[in-house]
Image (cartoon, rainbow, N blue to C red):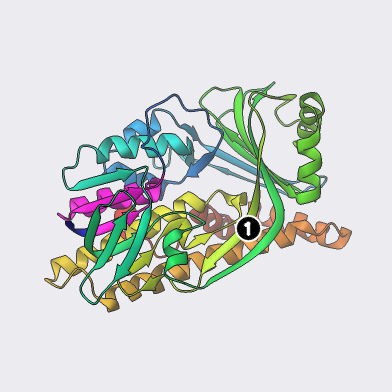
């Protein structure tokens, strides 16, 4: 039997980041993962995230950012427009204060670099290729029995185990969810013209298409979110026909586009746990919420969750209070639920707002984008949101 301060279920980027943050507080941590341990490998950029400066600051303070940045593509411009409309808005970095707007990172590469750092921490023990056979909590601790027979006792258990969270289901934490009736098609593509470190997004009638720059100046990662029927039709095309459809959808902004990897499609659903805390069990990141990828904020939202939880637990320790205190966990829940609700509402408004192709609404959207681009106050607020500098940030994420 192993006695620890915190058990984290899930060794994704959120779970590993939390483990490192808690180790800095002097706590002992176990990380449980049903899959294999990350292994260093050349990124393929099939699944990517757009990390913003707030997330970069968290990862920098954990001394893992340098390794992540070495394989990431910084972008200094963002261009957003509506297809077949005059409406568009653009953002640019302002060196030297703001040299980049964000970084396109391979999801698995982030996880690999975090795990390299985790392996250097004696306070963190990782258990890979295992499943939980029993999870029970008492007034004093949480007991986890693994299918290899090991038993872990801890003061707190954190579910960081993704959208289909075992912890959430086992604790019967209620879940609100709806189907976006869309699929996201992802792939690496070659561009005839260099991307010039610019992230681009076109709003189409069937859903948004994102062209995200990669380290190679003529390669991008695409995230094409389309209504299910349209996505299935696109996936059924041969490569040449798909290339033509993709180039047309992008309005040839980067010239002819050609596939450089296999296509993958993923159904899009919104999930939101209405309770994130049950006794000594707490949810973070995708286990608590998942949102539409149109703004690329899912990874950032999860990293802010774990930074907030670590901050609250650190405050408990500094004040000489017990690590577990119901009031502290409920404060975390209120804090991060408010931020998640705001992001979910914003993404839903964007999706619904751009999915209607009626001429009067299309005109209003075009005027709105142009005005937002021209009005400094509005544009600054949009820029702050994109940079992760708005909302109630954890201290470690502030600049």
Q: Is residue 30 visible?
A: yes
Residue drawn at 34 percent across, 35 percent down: 113
The answer to whether residue 151 is magenta is no
In the displayed structure image, the side of residue 303 where residue 7 appears, left or right: left
Q: Nearer the viewer, residue 102 or 62?
A: 62
What is the total number of numbered labels drawn onto the structure image?
1
Q: Position of residue 350 (x, y in %)?
A: 67, 59
Within the magenta stretch, is there residue 24? yes
Does 341 appear above or below 296?
A: below
**Within the image, what quadrant is residue 359 found in?**
bottom right
In the picture, measured across the screen, residue 235 lies left or right of residue 335, that is: right
Residue 82 % position (x, y)? 75, 48
* Left-right relation of 137 to 92: left
Quarter of the image where one finds residue 77: top right
Q: Secondary structure at mark 1?
A: strand
Look at mark 1 in the image and give the residue it sits on: 269
| Screen quadrant of the N terminus | bottom left
| Residue that lies at the very extreme toward the left in this rendered image | 320
Highlighted range, magenta: 6-34
């Amino acid at each position: 039997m192993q006695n620890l301060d915190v058990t984290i279920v899930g060794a994704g980027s959120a779970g590993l980041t939390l483990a490192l943050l808690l180790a800095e507080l002097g706590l002992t941590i176990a990380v449980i993962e049903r899959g294999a341990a990350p292994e260093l490998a050349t990124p393929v950029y099939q699944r990517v995230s757009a990390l913003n400066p707030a997330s970069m600051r968290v990862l920098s303070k954990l001394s893992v950012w340098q390794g992540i940045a070495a394989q990431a593509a910084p972008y200094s411009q963002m261009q957003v427009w509506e297809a077949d409309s005059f409406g568009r808005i653009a953002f640019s970095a302002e060196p030297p204060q703001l040299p980049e707007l964000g970084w396109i990172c391979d999801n698995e590469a982030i996880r690999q670099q975090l795990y390299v750092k985790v392996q250097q921490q004696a306070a963190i023990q990782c258990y890979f290729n295992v499943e939980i056979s029993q999870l029970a909590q008492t007034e004093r601790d949480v007991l986890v029995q693994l299918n290899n027979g090991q038993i872990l006792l801890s003061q707190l258990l954190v579910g960081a185990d993704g959208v289909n969270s075992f912890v959430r289901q086992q604790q019967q934490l209620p879940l609100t969810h709806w189907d976006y009736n869309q699929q996201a098609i992802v792939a690496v593509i070659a561009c005839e013209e260099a991307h010039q470190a610019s992230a681009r997004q076109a709003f189409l009638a069937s859903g948004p298409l994102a062209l995200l720059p990669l380290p190679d100046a003529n390669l991008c990662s695409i995230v094409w979110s389309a209504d299910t029927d349209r996505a299935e039709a696109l996936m059924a095309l041969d490569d040449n026909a798909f290339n033509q459809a993709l180039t047309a959808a992008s309005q040839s902004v980067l010239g002819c586009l050609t596939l450089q990897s296999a296509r993958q499609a993923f159904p899009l659903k919104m999930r939101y746990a209405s309770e994130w805390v049950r006794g000594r069990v707490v949810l973070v990141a995708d286990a608590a919420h998942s949102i539409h990828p149109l703004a690329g904020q899912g990874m950032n939202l999860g990293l802010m969750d774990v930074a907030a939880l670590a901050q609250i637990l650190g405050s408990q320790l500094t004040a000489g209070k017990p690590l577990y205190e119901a009031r502290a966990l409920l404060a975390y829940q209120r804090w991060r639920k408010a931020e998640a609700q705001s992001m979910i509402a914003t993404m839903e408004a964007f999706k619904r707002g751009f999915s209607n192709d009626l001429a009067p609404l299309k005109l209003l959207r075009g005027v709105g984008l142009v005005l937002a681009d021209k009005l400094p106050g509005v544009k600054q607020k949009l820029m702050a949101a994109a940079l992760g500098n708005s909302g109630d940030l954890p201290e470690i994420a502030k600049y």
